[in-house]
Amino acid sequence: MSDRVRCNCPRCTIRGLMGPAVLITLGVLFLFNEMRGGFFSFRNTFPVILIVLGVVSLASTLAPADGHISGSAPPTPPGAAPPRPQNSFPDQSQGF
Ligand SMILES: [Zn+2]
């Protein structure tokens, strides 16, 4: 879908589960709210979202980052020169 380099290290994989985990938790809590109400109303169960956020964040922090790929720089093929940054002010480098 996107052009970004996807890293498959355990840390980034677990971090990618943050959004789906929060969505599933929200869905389950709203389901409880509709089915049971009372003690299971969303007013009482919303801290579960914070717990899920904390657990996923803790798991991603503790997971090893072996083979981590930084998303900003695409890997250059061997033997290729690294890309040079464009000089945005070419006139200033030639004179004075
Ligand atoms: Zn990674």
Image (cartoon, rainbow, N blue to C red):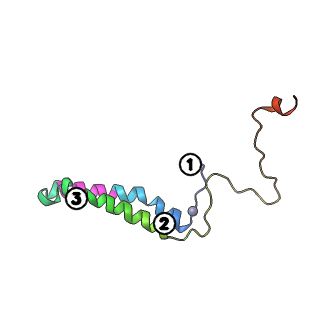
**SS under mark 1:** loop
Residue type for callout 1: Ser
Which badge, 2 or 3, is on the more N-terminal residue? 3
x and y, in percent, of residue 78 in the image: 79, 60
Task: Tell me if label 3 and label 1 are in contact, CB under 8 Å.
Answer: no
Residue carrying label 2? 61
- Mark sitting on residue 25: none
Using residue 66 as the reference point, say whether residue 47 is left or right of it.
left
Using residue 95 as the reference point, say whether residue 50 is left or right of it.
left
CA neighbours of label 1 inside 10 A, class few (<14), some (14 to 19), many (20+): few
**Residue 5 occupies quadrant:** bottom right
What segment carries the magenta color? 24-33
Residue carrying label 1? 2
Q: Residue at x 61, y 54 (%)?
A: 71
Q: Which mark is in front, 2 or 3?
A: 2
**In the image, residue 23 lies in the stretch drawn in magenta:** no
